[in-house]
Image (cartoon, helix red, strand yellow):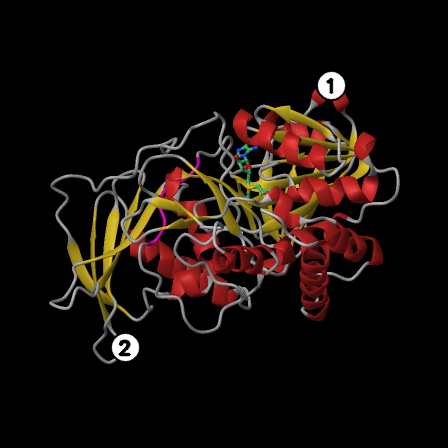
């Protein structure tokens, strides 16, 4: 298909202007890169998911279809670009992240001419192209777990005249043969920081990644490399990337979906905490995840006669579970809990702690990573409020099916079902 240069260039400029106005893009070199890189050349195929869970490709064979595709490509949207032929959220293999999130991350990366940057998660190569445009072929390195996606990105980047070093493999190992790097940027989420990334970052260098202790629990964190550790704060705005996978084509959960402990006799009580709270305020969910553990299945169930769910259901790795009614009687929601631990009590405690701490947003949290421990802290690394990360943390497979996400939160962009950056 032919796209006129003046057409995509005009769209790219409009996208850049929108991001500047939204405060997601500010420096001249990244503005220039955004206007110069033809995103459509790197994202020729955009996928949509049908209600039955199957995928279809956006039709670009008609003039209208081509306009729709270009509209998507030059808008501030994450585009789903590769999927495995299996049902469920795990079938998503790759996406091109929201341009506004990428520019926010690139700005936060604070690169300077001559910096060597390692990217984890090449995907379509769009972000790789922005980096290469800014820093040159010799300074950009990118690792992708899926060899076929990497090959496509390599061909498309080469057609645009970009020749960064592209490697197929598990980015968790970094890229020792080309280390050290001044910057490492990961466009997938890790449950804990791979120590290899710290080792491969120059002193004073920066690592920027999404850290998720459980599905939706965590956000972008920017760490500086010190001689003995990496340390830094979470970004104040929420972001969510797809999980880092350790094997290509690993589209089934690394850990089985938690199952309710059989024959666990439920206890019943009421709660004044709205079951939507953890999704409306993901910091609460983050705090709860340190106790609940990484394997958490969240969904909605017990549909009424119109098919609308009436309860939130949570199940965690040890088989403990809770169901909380979405409706309430004078502020009291009904709770049923079973298994060895009281899941909803843990979330209530996390919420109470969050209130006691002054309802902190993401920007008040930080992370310290050393060879033998990783811990999240509040306000300062020496704070008495710290939470150790499980090493290595398994990845969680489940996401809410229906998103009761409304209202304010410390997270400007609350998690929606299946939402990825
Ligand atoms: C959000 S997408 C990438 C977005 C990409 N930066 C772009 O602009 O298109 C995340 C990518 O990380 C890749 N990925 C997942 N686990 C990985 C790993 N262990 N090492 C390298 N890449 C990985 C996925 O296959 C996927 O392509």
**Which mark, residue 366?**
none
> Which SS class for mark 1?
helix
> Which SS class for mark 2?
loop
Q: Residues within 10 Å of mark 2 (few under 14, many from 20)?
A: few
Magenta-colored span = 395-400
Tell us which disc is closer to us: 1 or 2: 1
Q: Residue at x 67, y 61 (%)?
A: 11
Beta carbon of the mark 1 residue lies under 8 A of ligand 1: no
Q: Is any part of residue 367 visible from this angle?
A: no
- Report the residue marked by disc 2: 331
Q: Residue at x 75, y 56 (%)?
A: 35
Is 110 or 212 nearer to us in this picture? Answer: 110
Residue 33 magenta-drawn?
no
- Residue placed farthest to the right in the image? 113
Chain-order first, disc 1 or disc 2: 1
Which SS type dominates the magenta stretch? loop
Q: Residue at x 60, y 24 (%)?
A: 168
Q: Gap between marks 1 and 2, in whole Å?
A: 59 Å
Q: Position of residue 383 (x, y in %)?
A: 64, 52
In which image quadrant can residue 301 be found? Answer: bottom left
Q: Position of residue 403 (x, y in %)?
A: 35, 62
In which image quadrant can residue 135 be found? Answer: top right
Residue 99 vs 327, above or below: the answer is above
């Amino acid at each position: 298909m032919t796209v006129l240069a003046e057409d995509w260039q005009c769209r790219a400029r409009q996208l850049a202007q929108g991001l500047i106005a939204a405060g997601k893009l500010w420096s001249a070199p990244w503005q220039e890169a955004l206007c110069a890189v033809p995103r459509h050349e790197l994202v020729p195929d955009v996928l949509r998911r049908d209600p039955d869970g199957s995928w279809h490709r956006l039709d670009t064979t008609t003039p209208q279809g081509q306009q729709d595709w270009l509209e998507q490509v030059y808008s501030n949207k994450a585009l789903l670009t590769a999927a495995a032929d299996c049902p469920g959220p795990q079938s998503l293999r790759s996406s091109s992240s929201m341009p506004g999130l990428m520019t926010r991350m690139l700005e936060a990366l604070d690169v300077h001419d001559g910096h060597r940057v390692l990217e984890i998660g090449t995907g379509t190569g769009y972000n790789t192209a922005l980096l290469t445009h800014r820093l040159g072929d010799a300074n950009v390195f990118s690792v992708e777990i899926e060899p076929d996606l990497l090959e496509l990105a390599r061909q498309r980047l080469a057609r645009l005249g970009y020749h960064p070093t592209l490697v197929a493999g598990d980015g968790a190992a970094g890229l020792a043969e080309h280390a050290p790097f001044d910057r490492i940027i990961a466009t997938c989420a890790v449950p804990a920081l791979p120590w290899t990334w710290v080792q491969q970052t120059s002193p004073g260098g920066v690592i920027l990644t999404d850290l998720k202790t459980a599905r939706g629990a965590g956000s972008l964190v920017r760490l500086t490399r010190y001689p003995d550790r990496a340390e830094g704060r979470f970004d104040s705005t929420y972001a969510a990337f797809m999980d880092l996978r350790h094997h290509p084509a690993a589209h089934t959960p690394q850990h089985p979906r938690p199952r309710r402990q059989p024959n666990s006799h439920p206890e019943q009580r009421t709660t004044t905490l709205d079951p939507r709270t953890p999704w409306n305020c993901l910091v609460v969910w983050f705090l709860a995840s340190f106790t609940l553990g990484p394997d958490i299945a969240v969904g909605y169930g017990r549909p009424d006669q119109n098919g609308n769910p009436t309860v939130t259901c949570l199940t965690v790795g040890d088989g403990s579970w809770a169901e909380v009614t979405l409706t309430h009687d004078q502020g009291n929601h009904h709770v049923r809990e079973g298994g060895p631990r009281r899941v909803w009590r843990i979330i209530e405690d996390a919420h109470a702690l969050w209130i006691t701490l002054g309802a902190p947003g993401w920007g008040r949290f930080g992370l310290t990573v050393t060879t033998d421990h990783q811990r999240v802290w509040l306000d300062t690394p020496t704070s008495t409020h710290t939470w150790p990360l499980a090493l290595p943390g398994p990845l969680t497979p489940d996401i809410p099916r229906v998103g009761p996400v409304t209202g304010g939160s410390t997270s400007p962009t609350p998690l929606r079902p299946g939402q990825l950056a």
